[in-house]
Amino acid sequence: MSVVTQRSPPAEILVLDDGSEERCGDAAAAMLRRPALARPRRRQVLTLVGWWGWSSADLARFEDEVVVTPNRGVAHARNAGIRRARGDWIMCLDGDDTVSDSYLMRAMEQVALVPRTNLVYANQQFFDGSRWQWTVPPLRADNALVNGPLPLMTLWRKDLWLATPHGFDEALPKGHEDWAFWLQLTRLPLLPHKLDDFLTQYRYKKDSKMRTRERNNPEVPRLMRTLFADLYPVRKLLIDHHELLKPAGEPGQKPGITEAVVMDVSVSQHLHPTRPEPHLWSGMILQAKGDLAGAAAAYNASAALAAPYDWQGSYRLWRALLLLGDGAAAAREEAAQAAEGAAERLRESFQAELSESRSAHREAESRAAALAAQLHESRLATREATHRLEGAEQEAALLREQTAELRRENSGLAAANHALEKAAGTSRIEVAALSASTADKDALVAKTSSLLEAAADARRRLEEQVAAQKEEAAKLQAKLTASAGEIVKGNQIISRLQADLRTSKSKVRLKASAMAQQADVASSTQQALDATEREVTELKAQLVVATSHRDAAEAAAAEGRRQLAEAQQLLKSNQQVIQWLNSELNESQAGARAHTAASSLLSSSRGNPFRPSPLLHASTPPLERPASMAACDASAAGASAAGASAAGAS
């Protein structure tokens, strides 16, 4: 609220919410919209219109608003707000700090007296946890190197922020962002002015997040100093390096860089890959953990990205290579020494140029003081002229009232124009979003078309493979049909042999077992044929879906070929059995003819043609089982097994 009650009000108020869990931005937006605050703020801005002679277009530039940013720290939020700001002067103010109601007026009075002034600050009063009064010293580079030189509520031109390389440095681990910003400003030509009164108030809390972090993480100022190799002495930075490289020791002993800061460094290296400092810090963390190779890689990246005056990455790389025991360490040491000498010479030249610029700055200050005296004299003359013009102003009062009426009308028109510009901006954003969406959809359609073409090619190749598989299956089926015909012929021959063997009564018992085996073989062969027909049916079904089961069809075809070979082996064994049975049949027919002749002789004597003579039966030697019969039985058993396998394979 201290900003709203200023006697010289700001043209705009930007409230920054860096992703707070309490959603402070919503509360601030509601507060800005509240009539009790919105109406006074409107009157303040209209007062500025009268002071500075703004037009309605100038008035439309400024608007109080809430800026919500991702939770990436104070530096990121401040930079986002400064980019959004439309004024020429910037003042940052934390939510729990305040400024006096005359602070902005007195600062702008100084700017009016000395227009080249680009930075204004005042003394600071602590409150809440402390009553200390900070008499801010004059801004000098040597003071800025030791402590944060200025209060946060210092006013400065936006041009200074634009002239710094990083603004509030977002790569720095959380803490000392304002200190790093003031150090960047010391590199620029400044014309500061100090207001001697205590016009800024700072809330001091012993257990605040900043105080706790300063106590728990003393490495943050050391990391901050590595950002300014051109300002800090080499010896001071080497001492900081030594402290940062301390490894974790005994329990309770803190490492050079604590785990909380290690996480911040990792995030900084990810978000700012082109900055040399995060790589330098990462290398120090890896070296403290004993990973010299990883540290050397990080130092190398830092040295490649560093400015000419920043010697730290090259120096740390040289030290890491020495610790690694590289064979070319001596040459690298010489190169590092040469680079360090060049950096020192560059630093000396930079210091000389800085001294010259400072002397020129002092001369410019003296000239500015003379010009300020001349300006004061001219202001006195202006006051005298003002007294003479008072009479003319009274006569112009009526014209001013009419002008005010016209300005109010213009203000309304400007507000309407601003609303129309907002709507047009929203429409442009929507058109851009639709264009981007259309482009994405076109790309998706092109990608889908290419995928469909690739799928069609794959389908054609698969159909060709399926046709080849069908041809091979047809050939296999033809071979199986031929094999089945051969087996049927064999069964017919076996049937005839069985009919002939039944007429051979003398060898009924001898041939009964063989006939039973042959019957088993025939039944197993029939079963094999049935199984073969079922397998062929299944193979046809598999061929119908061969588009998605090509590998399975190939396996089935291979299995069919193997079973066909087994069926052929079975056929060969059956042919051997048939040959053996033919020979046996011939022998049995010859024996039957002889037996029939003998029986005819006996029947003529006894009148019984079917009863053999005991004498002839006794004298006739028994039929011996040939050796080939046993071999044939074994072959028949093997053939039965082979027939069963062939049936399963079919």
Image: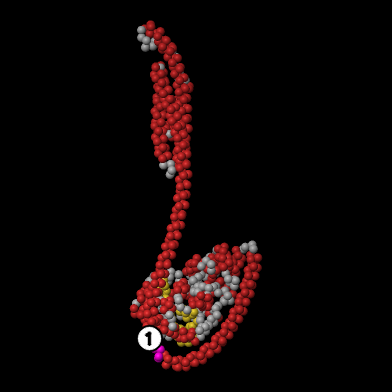
Residue marked by disc 1: 401
Work out which residue is located at the far left of the displayed protein and give it. 35
Residue 403 in view, yes or no: yes
**Quarter the N terminus occupies:** bottom left
Which residue appears farthest toward the top when viewing the image?
Answer: 605
Q: Can you give x and y, in whole percent of width and height, for residue 34 in the image? A: 34, 77
The residue tagged with tag 1: helix, strand or loop?
A: helix
Q: How many marks?
A: 1
Which residue is at the front of the view, 226 or 549?
549
- Image: 399 above or below 520: below
- State yes or no: residue 68 in magenta: no
Stretch of the chain drawn in magenta: 394-400
Task: Tell me what residue is drawn at x 42 percent, y 90 percent.
Answer: 393
Q: Give residue 184's position: percent from left, percent from top.
A: 53, 76
Is residue 258 visible from the viewing direction of this image? no
> Residue 59, how many percent across, how many down?
42, 78
Mark 1 Cα-neighbour bin, 10 Å: few <14, some 14–19, many ≥20: few
Residue depicted at 53% across the width and 78% down the height: 185
At x 58%, y 67%, the residue is 304
Task: Say left or right for 320 vs 627.
Answer: right
The residue nearer to you, when weighing 544 against 211, is: 544
* Prevalent SS, magenta region: helix
In the image, residue 389 sits, relative to residue 459, either above or below, namely below
Question: Which color mode does the image show?
Answer: secondary structure
Quadrant containing the C terminus in the rendered view: top left
Instruction: Give the image quarter of residue 643.
Output: top left
Q: Is residue 396 magenta?
A: yes
In the picture shown, does residue 134 fall above or below 539?
A: below
Residue 246: x %, y % from top left: 54, 69
Left or right relative to 39: residue 486: right
As shown in the figure, which amino acid type bears the numbered disc 1? Answer: Glu
